[in-house]
Image: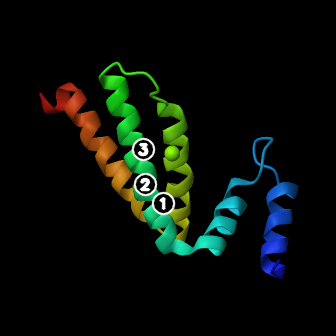
Amino acid sequence: MKLEKEILSKLCEEVPFEGGLNEECVYHLALDEWGVEKQLNKLVEECAELIVAVSKKINGLEGANIAEEIADVRIVMEQIIIALDLGDEIYKHKNEKLLRLYKKLTKENK
Ligand SMILES: [Mg+2]
């Protein structure tokens, strides 16, 4: 095991987050192991699984585990946010979109 990986692994366990592993450490560990290209492909795969789960739910089919698939998407998505340094940009877009949604939902826009 490389020294960096060894240190990161210990940090994941020693600096717990909400009683579990330190999420950010695990994301860095995954990125070090597989790299951003593989994780981008993983994100596509997990998004597809979420689409299937949501479609099953809509159509009343069994085996729609939306919560599990959302968890998978979130885990890989967080890795991509770190790898591509998208945090600030996402924050900006999210605020703009939330404001637009709010205006759409209130009398301000009716
Ligand atoms: Mg999945």
Which quadrant holds the N terminus? bottom right
Pointers 1 and 2 in contact (C-beta within 8 Å): yes
Identify which residue is drawn at 69% across, 67% down.
29
93 lies above or below 64:
below
Q: Measuring 51% from the left and 65% from the top, which residue is drawn there?
A: 39
Q: Residue furthest front?
A: 62
Q: Residue at x 77, y 50 (%)?
A: 21
| Quadrant housing the C terminus | top left
Instruction: Give the labeled residue for mark 2.
Output: 45
Labels 2 and 3 touching (C-beta < 8 A): yes
Q: Which residue is mark 3?
A: 49
| Furthest residue in direction top, as rendered | 60
Image x and y of residue 77, in percent:
49, 56
Q: Nearer the viewer, residue 65 or 62?
A: 62
Q: Quadrant of residue 101?
A: top left
Q: Is mark 3 within 8 Å of ligand 1?
A: yes
Check mark 2 vs ligand 1: CB closer than 8 Å? yes or no.
Answer: yes
Q: Residue furthest left?
A: 110
Where residue 41 sits: x, y (%)? 44, 64
Question: Which of these two is toward me, 60 or 94?
Answer: 60
Element on which disc 2 rests: helix
Secondary structure beneath dot 3 equals helix
